[in-house]
Amino acid sequence: MPCPIPKKSVNAVQSYKQIPLYHFNDYLHLLEDCISSKSLTPGKLIHQNLLKNPNFNTKNKSCITLLDKLSKLFITCSKPELAHKTFNSIPSPERQKKGILWNQLIRSYAWEGPFENAIHLYYEMVDIGVKPTKFTYPFVLKACAALQDIDNGVKIHDHVKRDGLASDVYISTALVDLYVKCGCLLEARQVFDEMPERDVVAWNAMISGFSIHGMYGDVIHLVLEMQEVGVSPNSSTFVTILPVIGEANEVIAGKAVHGLSVRRGIDSDVMMGTGLLDMYGKCGWLVYARRIFHAMTFRNEVTWSAMIGACIACDCTQEGLELFEQMRVEDVGSLSPVTLATVIRGTAKLIDLKVGKQIHGYTVKLGSNLVLMVANTLLSMYAKCGILDDATKFFEEMSFKDSVSYSALISGCIQNGSAEEALQIFRAMQLSAVEPILATMMGLLPACSHVAALRHGYSCHAYSIVRGFTADVSLCNALIDMYSKCGKIDVARVVFDKMHKKDLVSWNAMIIGYGIHGLGVEAISVFQNMQVVRQNPDEVTFIGLLSACSHSGLVAEGKHWFQSMSQEFSIKPRIDHYLCIVDLLGRNGLLDEAFNFIQGMPLKPDVRIWNALLSACRVYKKIELVEEISNKIQSLGPESTGNFVLLSNIYSTVGRWDDAADVRVMQKGLGFRKSPGSSWIEVNGVIHAFVGGDRSHSQSAKINEKLLQLQAEMKKLGYMAEPDFVYQDVEDEEKEHILLYHSEKLAVAFGLLNLDEEKAIFVTKNLRVCGDCHTALKFMTLITRRRIILRDMVRFHHFSEGGCSCGDFW
DNA sequence: ATAGGGTTAG
């Protein structure tokens, strides 16, 4: 019978061929030879011959010995199922005597799987009266840990206590590991604390428990504690703690581990090297990651994948993709889902749909059905590349969707500006009973911020508290943003103050929050606290700070911080920062200074800069500058501005209606969509949206009636419509009519009709509030004695008793 | 040891 024979078993097989097999003793010697040389194939042949032998009888003592040896051989060759079958052919009373073999079988299953079998075997041995020993428990517990089977784990823990084996190091370590893997850290700690002695493996088991949950502080504490009691961390300790160090961005601790590993000469070990370069990547130290990567003499797929991930994390995505190419040249093996997911994430970040689609094709070719993780990454890639239709289609075609799939699509919607759609997908998610996770909230909260859906925002917050998500810094940042955009700046501050750890985004979100509420003094105070705790600001911080000054009329402060931005903080101002200053000067009537400031800018002023000045000129009736500025804007041309609506409006302002119309035609021809001004209001958790002149709402007639009635009373108090704010070539009377049905007025009227008397009317607008509406809302508060809060694209306006929190200038 | 989802501004 032709059969490939492993080289190491040559002796065994040769003797097998030479010796005629009449006696079972001959088999026995051969088998022992096979066991010592781990030769599976000859063992299988012997097994077959044995079964064919007419003298074979399971009542015969020598036959039983042979079956015993065969089982041992199969265990030695890591074939637990084969061994199990052979073992089962031994009659039950004989099996009862073979305690060691039971233990070895359980151990084999615990290493190789299926893990369930280890647990079944354990109960079987207990049932037929074989006593488990200290060589049984560690392995059956290991199987429970692998399956996260806490029920059986706890039962077996009881058996351990009953047998008085609780002080055994190996068993206790296995118990710690079991509880850790099942997420029961308190129980793990209890077993650990009761151990009379702990070796490095026990410490590692406990440490990995805190590592899995990213509990950096506890991990470090344990590592220090183990050294205090004289146990030295080993490479597996380091490999366990490196991911936590990276996640916590604690590069100093990471460098300490690096140093230790160099001293011990284990820094180029594959696992150690991979762990180190990953840690440096997560901390943003790509130079170190690269250095380690190149110094490694042996790299496996995980190493490559970690290095690609490091490049992506450090904004060198292109380099990461080049590494991927290199990896495919050097390494011919098929790619794991983890590597694919990493690379797809890279293409998504570069918005490189071509490469992304190539990899999509590759994955389809690779496996019949996509691994869920890879599918989710692809879904997210399509969403991030801005093709929401493809993402939605891909999502619908997925045969299995989990929480991550839904979360990716929800985030995709909001990234593409469809907040309402995001909320819709969330409803579908709830209907499918898919559990919302942290990332779901991270997608939903910005959607709530965007449409100012405070009710939904509260629900997200409540759910996050219940699920423990509020321990996450990013989630709290999203909460701060949501509360401040939904008008609850005080609640935002409470969230901010309660955070045990803040990052740059937390500070920025708080400063921006105060800015859009016109609370410049508070924004500056937060900024100064930031210096106290030594948190470095970035360019976003200054956009928040400068616009806060601008919205609060803090001219001197704004100028001062603009200076100090480059001088003290070495941050080079971007065009957005210049825009803040132009706005700051313009809003406060310093038109000439603003004009000179623009002339002296080192950057080429764009259309937004001129428009900021133009608005100011309109408010301060500085007509002589208007023509000059609009000429400047026209010379920039719509292509360079990308903002057709703006240009068209500017033509309209100076009465060039034909040019304005031309721009609109050109815009249509180029396929640009203009986003129409719209406003919305939440009533009893439902969002009601309006566009200008909207008659589609079911209460339209009542709303119009209300507005006409208000207009009549406002006129008595001296209100005059400001036709300048209509960018269409129509008669003034018609203009007055258009203004009356601006979307913000419609939403306010709807709120007046549907909200309780004591409630403030909170309206959100996607663009900036129009000047006429701003004036009109002030009058409305006088007539109705109601408070009106309007959030537009840049800030909050609190209207009451005929005034606005931002004064006359909106 | 690598891993899917995610926060501020424009």
Image (cartoon, rainbow, N blue to C red):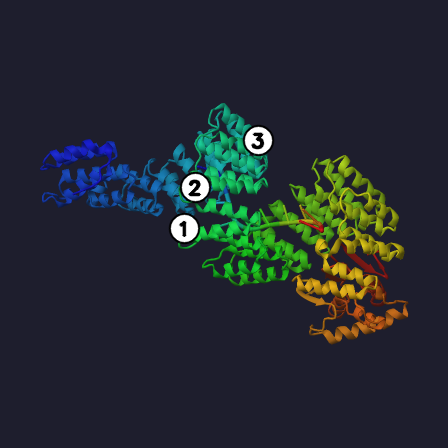
In the image, taking residue A100 as reference, residue A162 lies left or right, namely right
Q: Which chain is home to disc 1?
A: A
Can you say which quadrant of the picture contains the N terminus of chain A? Answer: top left
Report which quarter residue A253 is drawn in.
top right
Q: Which chain is mark 3 on?
A: A
In the picture of the structure, the residue carrying the numbered disc 3 is: A253
Kindly identify which residue carries mark 1. A366
Alpha-carbon distance for marks 3 and 1? 41 Å
**Of label 3 and label 2, which has the lower sequence position?**
2
Position of A18 compared to A618: left or right?
left
**Residue A280 location (% of width, % of height):** 55, 34
Relative image position of residue A721 (x, y in whole percent): 85, 67
Residue A808 shows in this picture? no
Residue A671 versus residue A750: which sits nearer the camera? Answer: A671
Of discs 1 and 2, which sits in the foreground?
1
* Cα distance between the residues tagged 1 and 2: 36 Å
| Pointer 1 local density, CA inside 10 Å: few below 14, some 14–19, many at least 20 | few
Question: Residues at marks 3 and 2, common chain?
Answer: yes
Q: Amino acid at mark 1?
A: Leu
